[in-house]
Amino acid sequence: MKHTIQRTYNFNAGPSALPLAVLEKAQQELVDFRETGMSVMELSHRSPAYEAVHNEAIKRLKDLFAIPENYEVLFLQGGASLQFSMIPMNFLQPGQKAGYVMTGSWSEKAITEAKLFGEPYEVASTKEAKYCRIPELNELQYNDSDAYIHVTSNNTIYGTQWQEFPDTADIPLIADMSSDIMSKSVDVSKFAMIYAGAQKNLGPSGVTLVIIRKDLLEKANGKLPTMLKYGTQVKSNSLYNTPPTFGIYMLGEVLRWIEETGGLEAVAQRNEEKAKLIYDAIDNSNGFYVGHAEHASRSLMNITFNLPSEDLEKKFLSEAKEAGFVGLNGHRSVGGCRASTYNAVPYEACKALSEFMIEFQRENGVN
């Protein structure tokens, strides 16, 4: 008797939901990939069969994200957290300054690592406002001589997202897009470098995407360990050592799924529709649900909110779990609730959550 799989409503912040169609295809190909008689996980990373997977993923990414010709695409390991170190290690020399826009925990971690190599400083910060908003562009104060400016495009813990990026002219702009990459179109040419962990919108954990402009590579510190030089990975097409082959295969299949479901324009529209369902439940609750982020800075990827009391929040999370919702706890550092609505989270899950929120308020509303 065949077991019927019951898919949960997965709102985990990461690793997060993957498209069911991609999981099912991976299941079909798991034992015998493209008639090789082997799983993708068993293929040599030097083999033509794997090289095709690798290069297909790069091509799909370049096409979907409209990456200009003067950029390199790399698949690395170590997550965004290793990039916090690699970026200043490669591009921030002792005595040089680099500007960091402080919008949450991840930018705090990034600037901490940069302090080991040069003189990073805060271009702007919304910490005093508990990171409830993204700074206005006119609040950013930086120097023309800066090695680079660093931003975090979406803040998973606080539920804020950049709606418009600064034009830093000749100063390289570097963005950590771990939690909203490929959720909408972005003008890549504005950035000298974009990096992202895969485990939100691109695939399973274990792969780190780096998109880097060739002229930035020319400024890199050459006196670094081999594996910590971006140039090493560029020269070897990210195959200097064994890459996370299965993760890259899955990333390529997620990109194929994006293609087949209408591309980034369709993805962006779906994400707006999904987020609206939950934000409407918050906004129409007469204060029963209170969103953390200011309206103009609201994220379409991570929706953060609180209830009138901690006891009600605990009850909400407990009943939500019983109803099949997973991952709605806020980050341990801030508490509250959080719904992460990444690309692969279906509309139906967001609709179900919205309806649950409305019903919970009806039964528990404070008169």
Image: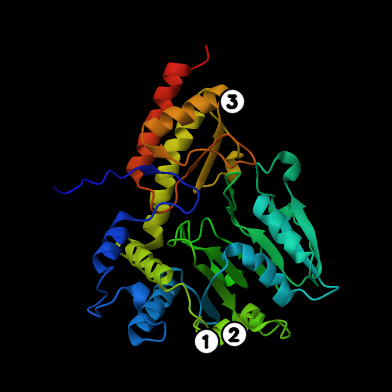
Name the residue that disc number 3 marks: 310
Q: Which residue does the image show at 49% across and 52% down from the upper left?
A: 14
Give the farthest residue toward the left.
Answer: 1
Q: Which residue does the image show at 58% across and 42% down from the upper left?
A: 331
Q: For numbered disc 3, what is the local secondary structure?
A: helix
Q: Residues within 10 Å of mark 2 (few under 14, many from 20)?
A: some
Q: Which residue does the image show at 31% across and 59% down from the upper left?
A: 23
Q: Can you say whether 288 is above or below 139 in the image?
A: above
Distance CA(mark 2)–CA(mark 1):
6 Å
Rendering quarter of residue 321:
top left
Q: Residues within 10 Å of mark 3 (few under 14, many from 20)?
A: few
Q: Residues within 10 Å of mark 1 (few under 14, many from 20)?
A: few
Q: Are marks 2 and 1 in contact (CB under 8 Å)?
A: yes
Of the residues under marks 3 and 2, which one precedes in the sequence? 2
Q: For numbered disc 2, what is the local secondary structure?
A: helix
Q: Which residue does the image show at 40% across and 74% down from the upper left?
A: 57
Closer to the camera in the image, 52 or 67: 52
Asked whether the viewer can see residue 147, the reply is yes
Name the residue that disc number 2 marks: 232
Q: Position of residue 188 (x, y in %)?
A: 54, 69
Rendering quarter of residue 141:
bottom right
Distance CA(mark 1)–CA(mark 3):
52 Å
Q: Amino acid at mark 1?
A: Ser
Asked whether the viewer can see residue 261, the reply is no
Q: Which mark is residue 236?
A: 1
Q: Amino acid at mark 2?
A: Thr
Give the farthest residue toward the top.
Answer: 367
Q: Is residue 328 left or right of residue 129?
A: left
